[in-house]
Every structure is written in structure tokens, then in C-alpha cells.
Amino acid sequence: MTMATRLREIVVVGAGVAGVRAAETLRQKGFDGALTIVGDERQPPYHRPPLSKKLLSGEIHRAGIDMAPQFDLDATVFRGASAVGLDDKSCTVRVRDEDRELSLRYDGLVIASGAVPRQWPGGPVPDGVMMLRTVDDCLAIRKRLASRPRVAVVGGGFIGVEVAATCRALGLKVTLIQRGSNPLLSALGAELAPHWAELHRRHGVDLRLGVGVEKFVGKRKVKAVRLTDGSRVAADLVVIGLGVTPATDWLEGSGVRIDDGVLCDATGAAEGVRGVVAAGDVARWWHPRYERHLRIEHWDVANRQGEAAAQTLLTGPQHAERFDEIPYFWSDQYDVKLQMLGLPTDHDSVDIVEGDLDEWEFVAAYGRGGRTVAVLSTIPGRVHAYRGALEENAAFPPKPPA
């Protein structure tokens, strides 16, 4: 008898792509019991990638990012509700829904609570200093862009560079402030990150690299950003992108093992408890291919993990397949689409295997120990031709596929 025939009550905490994909998979695979989804936003489920790009620019409308249901979920959905506790012994999730607290019983639980943005460490900030994580954040920022403010972006990760690119495409004056030597340094490495810095300079972004923020100037409304080198950047709008942390506070004392996210085995089963799986930004899975726990904050991984976690819940981890998908992500900046397949962490070599770096149409391979570990491409779709090389742990540099 499979677990699918025994489970009668499944709770999914999180209504992002990982949670929704898990819920869809449960129904698709035949689960016909009670299904409850708890989402901390009042908005219906939506795709996050456009928040820093097309929705922010106004190129698409709010409805254009909604997730189209693939299956009839027949679920009880709590919107604007937060999970505040988990009791593994009684198999209940405590949920705060407005001014009431509920206890939801489960015999299967999907943890897909995502991540929360890091707050500004300096305490309260003046009006006009904002973060971008939710669709409400995006629409609030977009409304302010209509007055054509001077924009400062703090943080050179993907959110920061995409917001900078979007604002420049709107013709706004943009300054990007980054403590590191280049934007996207941790994602792309020291070899290619400077190339993206040059891309932003070429499009008119004022890059302030190797400096931090000392304070925001302005009592009620922000007027400027004072940097640690003593300089001052005039700004009417500041967007902070300091990264995120996994949303695990509600799991404290539950028995679920936490270490930079919910620790999971290779199938997505949460360590320390039974009948619980995790997926998306909150999950730190053991990846068989890389032989380490990984927590990856990208849409494609969250989508695939949601499906895999649901199947693990239904079959039980002892019968489930290991999730060893090669990570994939993309980023649109100006007219350049960056696509990455694999994991360049700890690489020791980079080689341009196709095209011309200066022409912005190229494929770059990352190597470690003489083997190919990741491929980056600015030629739309070309990166997927190298999937076989990564799956086979091919020698570095890989030969361009036919």
C-alpha cells in the first residue's frame, strides 16, 4: 500500500511556485483527501520573476503574472495567513489568520514558506527607502517611478541589477551601490562579473563599487544616500536588495532540522520529523550530484522541487526518486538574457567555448578539477544544449554540441 492511499489530510504552507506546484502534483497523482494551502499574501498565487522586470516597468499588467491553475485543486485556501508554529507530536500547524489562531491537523505536510528579505540593519529608514519582494512591493515602487525619481539601488545581486536595468530602460537616473568589487560576483565569479558591470555602465548606470551605505539622508523623505567613502548620492527613491533568509522562524522547537533552511534528504523529506517535505527557497536539499546540501533561490528549481516533494510525500521517502536536477536560472537585463545551467560554486576555470564576449553573444563554461560544472550563455536557449555535458561530468572545456 502506498502512502497516497493512507494520507487523508495534507497541509501546504506557502502559496508561491513551490507550494502551488506541490498542491497541483498531489491532485494530479491521485490524492483525494483534504488539501489546505496557507499563504501569507492576500494576492492569488503569482510568478515572482517579473516583479523586477516587466511588471515593474509597466510592460505587463498585474493579472499577467498570475499562476494559471493546471488542475482543480479542490483546496481550502487561507490568504493573508501565517504559519506560526508546528507541533510534530500532534501533527498540527498553528496558523494566525487575522485576529484568530487556528490549528490545522495533517498527516502530510509540505513546507514551502519561502524566504523573507533581509531588513536594513541600521534601524528605521525615511520614506522612499523600499524593498522588493512581493507584488505589492512592486506596485508601490512602480507608482513612485511615475514621478521620475532619482533612483539608488543598494545591493548588486539579481534583484538589484534587474531593478537598475528596468529603471534605466525607463530613462531614469540610476546609481547602483555594491560593497563587493562587482555586481553578481557571487553568482558569476570574478571572471565574468566585471563584464556585467560594464554592461550597466554602458547603459548609463552610475556604479559605486567597493563601498557601503553609512546612512540615508532625510528626516521624513529620503533625499540622498551617504556612502562609507564619504561621498553622497542624491536619491528620491532607494530600493534595497540585501538578499533573503529562509522563512523558518515558525518551525522553532518543532524537531525539524534547520541550518540555513529546512534540511532535507535527497528526496525532499525533511530531516528530524516524519511525513514532512520541503521545497523552494526554504528548503536545503542534499543534492546527489554535488554531494552537499544546497538551497537555491530560483524559480525553476522551486517549481521542480515542489513537484518532487509532493511525490515524495505520496510514496514515502524510501520509495521516492532522488532529486538530482541540474540547477537552472535566467536573468533579463536590458537586451541581454543571461542563462545559467549548473553550479559554478568553487570553479577553478572559465573558458569562452562559443561566440564573442565583446559582442555579447557567447557561451562560457565553468570547470573544476578538469570537469565541466556549469555553463552560462547569452545566446537564448543555447545553454540547454550543454545539459548532456553536465550530466556526464564531461571534461573541461566541453566541446560545443552540434
Image (cartoon, rainbow, N blue to C red):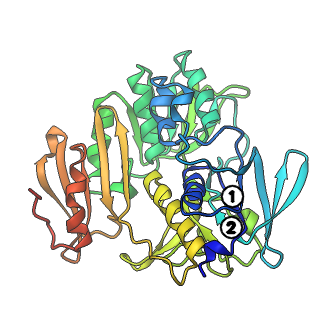
Q: Position of residue 202 (x, y in %)?
A: 27, 31
Disc 2 marks a residue whose amino acid type is: Leu
Disc 1 marks a residue whose amino acid type is: Val
Residue nearer the viewer, 256 or 198: 256
Residue most extreme to the right: 100
Q: Is residue 394 above or below residue 330?
A: below
Residue nearer the viewer, 6 or 339: 6
Q: Position of residue 127 (x, y in %)?
A: 69, 29
Question: Of marks 1 and 2, which one's residue comes earlier in the chain?
Answer: 1
Residue in the picture at 64% in, 34% down: 136
Residue in the picture at 89% in, 55% down: 101
Q: Is residue 319 left or right of residue 27?
A: left
* Residue 168 placement: quadrant: top left
Q: Residues within 10 Å of mark 1 (few under 14, many from 20)?
A: many
Q: Which mark is residue 46?
A: none
Residue in the picture at 72% in, 39% down: 42
Q: Which residue is mark 1?
A: 13
Label 1: which secondary element = strand
Q: Is residue 369 left or right of residue 397?
A: right
- Labels 1 and 2 touching (C-beta < 8 A): yes
- Quarter of the figure with the N terminus: bottom right
Q: Position of residue 64 (x, y in %)?
A: 51, 30
Residue in the picture at 53% in, 69% down: 311
Q: Which residue is mark 2?
A: 109
Residue nearer the viewer, 204 or 80: 80
Q: Residues within 10 Å of mark 2 (few under 14, many from 20)?
A: many
Q: Position of residue 284 (x, y in %)?
A: 54, 69
* Residue 260 placement: quadrant: bottom right
Label 2: which secondary element = strand
